[in-house]
Image: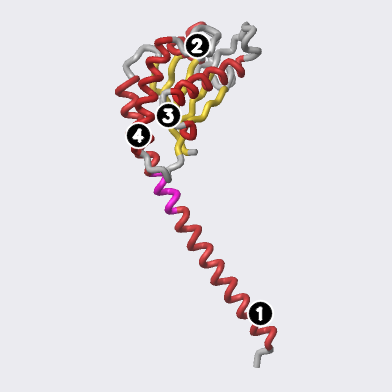
């Protein structure tokens, strides 16, 4: 005959095994749900990417690179400045319209953002306004985000990041290479 402490221990061990099984089942169900949300976002990303390609893809100074839209800085900003020029405002207005439509289509339980990345070339900035390329690249990304917000895009769907000269897409040192590296990149991603 088992003693009372032994029965209590066995019952506790049984409850522990049952709890572990429930936790494993919940973890598995959570992984399935997360995978479904990632798949849904991928579908919306593909639709959005196709729409942006139709709207922006044929413009000089705008390229599609993998899963990103790349705007050459000269299309959007005057040299060494972070204020959108009129042409840049026109391009960003098209983007704002596409993003507002996307916000209406993506269910609220899918966490997504448009990441706006600012990049510069390797030449040191020579501006009283910006002390470094970090500051210029960040200010440009923020200028795009602020423009989108001012034109109706929800702030919780936007992220601004500045990379300075540290993420070049062209390792060359020619003027053409430097021009390619001065850019704004847009990427729709999960939050």
State the mark number for residue 46.
4
Which of label 2 and label 4 is nearer to you? 4
Instruction: Check contact, mark 2 vs mark 3: CB within 8 A.
Output: no
Which of marks 1 and 2 precedes in the sequence? Answer: 1
Which of marks 1 and 4 precedes in the sequence? Answer: 1
Mark-to-mark CA distance, 2 and 3: 33 Å
Q: Residue furthest left?
A: 54
Q: Relative to 16, does residue 85 appear above or below in the rendering?
A: above
Instruction: Check contact, mark 4 vs mark 3: CB within 8 A.
Output: no
Which of marks 4 and 2 precedes in the sequence? Answer: 4
Relative image position of residue 1 (x, y in whole percent): 65, 93
Question: Mark 1 packing: few (<14 Cα in 10 Å), some, or many (20+)?
Answer: few
- The magenta span reads 32-39
State the mark number for residue 9.
1
Give residue 66's quadrant in the image: top left
Which of label 4 and label 3 is nearer to you? 3
Mark-to-mark CA distance, 1 and 3: 58 Å
Task: Determine if the magenta segment contains residue 142.
Answer: no
Mark-to-mark CA distance, 4 and 1: 55 Å
- Residue identifier under label 2: 177
- Residue identifier under label 3: 153
Q: Measuring 51% from the left and 14% from the top, which residue is drawn there? A: 182
Instruction: Check contact, mark 2 vs mark 1: CB within 8 A.
Output: no
For numbered disc 4, what is the local secondary structure? helix
Question: Mark 3 packing: few (<14 Cα in 10 Å), some, or many (20+)?
Answer: many
């Amino acid at each position: 005959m088992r003693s009372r402490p032994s029965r209590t221990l066995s019952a506790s061990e049984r409850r522990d095994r049952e709890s572990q099984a429930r936790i494993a089942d919940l973890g598995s169900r959570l992984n399935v749900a997360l995978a479904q949300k990632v798949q849904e976002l991928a579908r919306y990303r593909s639709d959005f990417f196709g729409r942006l390609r139709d709207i922006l893809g044929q413009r000089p100074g705008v390229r599609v690179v993998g899963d990103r839209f790349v705007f050459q800085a000269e299309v959007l900003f005057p040299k060494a400045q972070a204020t959108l020029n009129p042409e840049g405002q026109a391009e960003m207005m098209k983007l704002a319209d596409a993003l507002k439509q996307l916000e209406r289509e993506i269910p609220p339980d899918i966490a997504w953002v448009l990441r706006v990345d600012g990049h510069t070339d390797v030449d040191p900035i020579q501006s009283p306004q910006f002390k470094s390329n970090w500051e210029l690249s960040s200010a440009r990304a923020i200028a795009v985000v602020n423009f989108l917000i001012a034109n109706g895009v929800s702030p919780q769907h936007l992220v601004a990041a500045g990379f300075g000269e540290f993420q070049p897409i062209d390792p060359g040192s020619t003027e053409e290479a430097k021009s390619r590296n001065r850019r704004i990149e847009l990427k729709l991603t999960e939050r």
